[in-house]
């Protein structure tokens, strides 16, 4: 099964549930959804169903080759 695109996810999870009265309102609310929820809290299947913040906390960088 192909993975849904980001924009398909955005529409299904956020846009279709809302009525925006102005373009400015839509811009603000979509920006907040992406920056606060999608990029920090929402669990992503591609990173083991962790949120991006959880994934980053668990990430330990490999020592660089000198």
Image (spheres, rainbow, N blue to C red):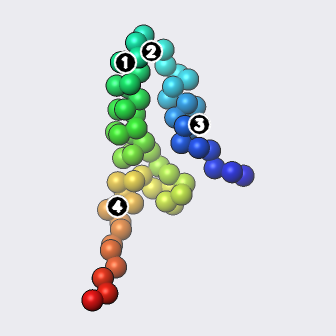
> Between disc 2 and disc 3, whose residue precedes?
3
Closer to us: mark 4 or mark 2?
Answer: 2
Q: Residues within 10 Å of mark 3 (few under 14, many from 20)?
A: few
> Between disc 2 and disc 1, whose residue precedes?
2
Q: Is residue 7 left or right of residue 53?
A: right
Q: Which mark is residue 25?
A: 1
Which residue, as the protein is rendered here, is positioned at the far top?
21
Q: Residue at 34% across / 61% down in the picture?
A: 56
Quarter of the view holding residue 36 = top left
Q: Residues within 10 Å of mark 2 (few under 14, many from 20)?
A: few
What percent of the width, then of the height, locates residue 30? 41, 29
- Residues at marks 2 and 1, CA–CA distance in whole angstroms: 6 Å
Q: Are marks 3 and 4 in contact (CB under 8 Å)?
A: no
- Residues at marks 3 and 1, CA–CA distance in whole angstroms: 20 Å
Q: Which mark is residue 8?
A: 3
Q: Are marks 4 and 1 in contact (CB under 8 Å)?
A: no
Secondary structure type for disc 4: helix
Q: Which mark is residue 56?
A: 4
- Residues at marks 4 and 1, CA–CA distance in whole angstroms: 31 Å
Quarter of the view holding residue 16 = top right
Q: Residue at 39% across / 53% down in the picture?
A: 52
């Amino acid at each position: 099964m192909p993975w849904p695109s980001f924009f398909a996810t955005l529409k299904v999870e956020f846009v279709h549930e809302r009525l925006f009265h102005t373009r400015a309102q839509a811009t603000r609310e979509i920006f907040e959804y992406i920056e606060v929820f999608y990029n920090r809290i929402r669990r992503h299947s591609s990173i083991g169903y962790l949120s991006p913040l959880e994934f980053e906390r668990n990430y330990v960088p490999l020592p660089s080759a000198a």
